[in-house]
Image: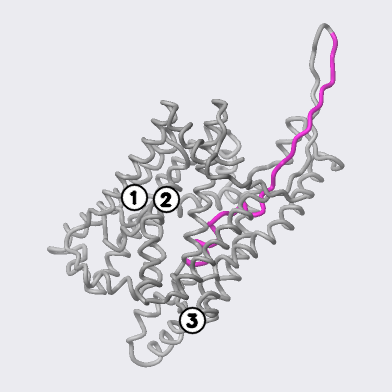
Amino acid sequence: MVSTEAQGTRWPSLIQAAIDAFSLPDLRAKILFTLGILVLYRFVAHIPIPGIDQVQLDNLFRGNQLLGFLDLFSGGALSRMSIVALGVFPYITASIVIQLLTPVIPQLQALSREGEGGRVKMNRMVHWLTVPIAISQAVAQLVLLQQSNVLTEVGFTGTALLPTLAAIVSMTAGTMFLVWLGELITERGIGNGISLIIFAGIVVGFPSLVTQGFVDRDNLLGIGFFVIIGVVIIALIVLFNEAARRIPVQYGRSVFRSGRMYRQSGSTYIPLRINSAGMIPLIFAFSIVILPGAMATYFATSSGIVGNIATFFADLFTPTAPFYWVLVFILVVIFTFFYTLVVFNQQQLAENLQRNGGFVLGIRPGKPTQDYLNRVIVRITMGGALFLGFVAIVPYLASLITNVQAVSLSSTSLLIMVGVGLDTLRQLEAQLLMRNYEGFLR
């Protein structure tokens, strides 16, 4: 049976819970520390690298969907070419790479089974892998800016060497600085720090996206439709993010008491979430679909067959083409299944249950339990995959219905915002419940 645990909350109880949170000195310190780190991040996001032509940069972002997608994770820092222009995207990429390589490389499999010590070592690998990824992305961004006349001197020879190295080092250091800030939030604040860094960037940029998309066009119908779609999508995101299939589990153990052995038992359940992949499939899908069109635009001006092929792909992979959104939907569904199964198999639930004396009711321990859980996760992931695919193509569907060009990737932004918000409220609620206070979510 699938349960939806996202309970409604009345405004008075929400306000009272906020008052309770700030009335506790240690919890208040965590909240203020988290807000202070996020404010520091927004200050750093306004420090640009030298030599930027802002007018040319604005023109570049208006016509490049790939940069707009990456700017989503930098909170507008990329559109200003700040020292934190890359955001935490290299760290996310490194985390995904390590996670996907874990089932393939035996050494990583062994580390994943070593508990906290293994997780620390794998996290260190993610940090080391983030550096070359950030450097390669910084070089690619600088070359792109030079081709678009945003930067005049980019290269590794002559007078361009020092400015180029300074920009690369600054952008790489900016990414690692954001990762450090995120880990500080996780350790000493409230919520997942990396997720909150992304969340803060989206929240800051979201009002300007709405203004540019609708208010500047004086389209009242578009504003009203956007509000309705936004409310519906938020409700669906909450519903699917909190929905889970409960697998009943029975535990049995022996207890020695007063010279005799007693058999005790207890029951619980394993919550298998319908949308356990989160936003990762959308990141994969949009990265793949946007890249061919972005590359084709740089060859479209060529003469001959190269220019004709590049123009064909540029038109095919544009956000106004139906093929673009059909491919997005298909890729999101595929990546949802792929990522969910990879992460689920890494958890080794059947093995852990058997080791701790637990078993699923009606299913033999060991491989039969693993096969049963795999069948269940495949069935419930179908709903999550179709939901994520629908969320991904909502902007296109909205533009077809109202003839309004919806803000690009707004549904992805909502998915991230709602998911991170729910996770943060859940952690804050846990802190309140530890102190016998009523939380945000009931």
Label 3 SS:
loop
Q: Amino acid at mark 3?
A: Asn
Q: Amino acid at mark 1?
A: Thr
Instruction: Please state the horizontal and vertical placement of residue 183, each as a whole percent of the image.
Output: 41, 39
- Going from N to C along the chain, the mark reached first, 2 or 1, is 2
In the rendering, which numbered label is found on residue 175? 1
Question: Does the segment drawn in magenta span residue 37?
Answer: no
Highlighted magenta segment, given as a residue range: 260-287
Q: Sequence-wise, which precedes: disc 3 or disc 1?
A: 1
**Distance from Cα at disc 2 to Cα at disc 1:** 8 Å
- The residue at the point 68 percent across, 49 percent down is 4
Name the residue beneath numbered marker 2.
91
In the rendered view, tell whether residue 368 sits above or below residue 118: below
What amino acid type should be assigned to the residue bearing mark 2? Answer: Tyr
Comparing 183 with 34, the one in front is: 34
Cα separation between marks 3 and 1: 39 Å
Which residue is at the far bottom? Answer: 304
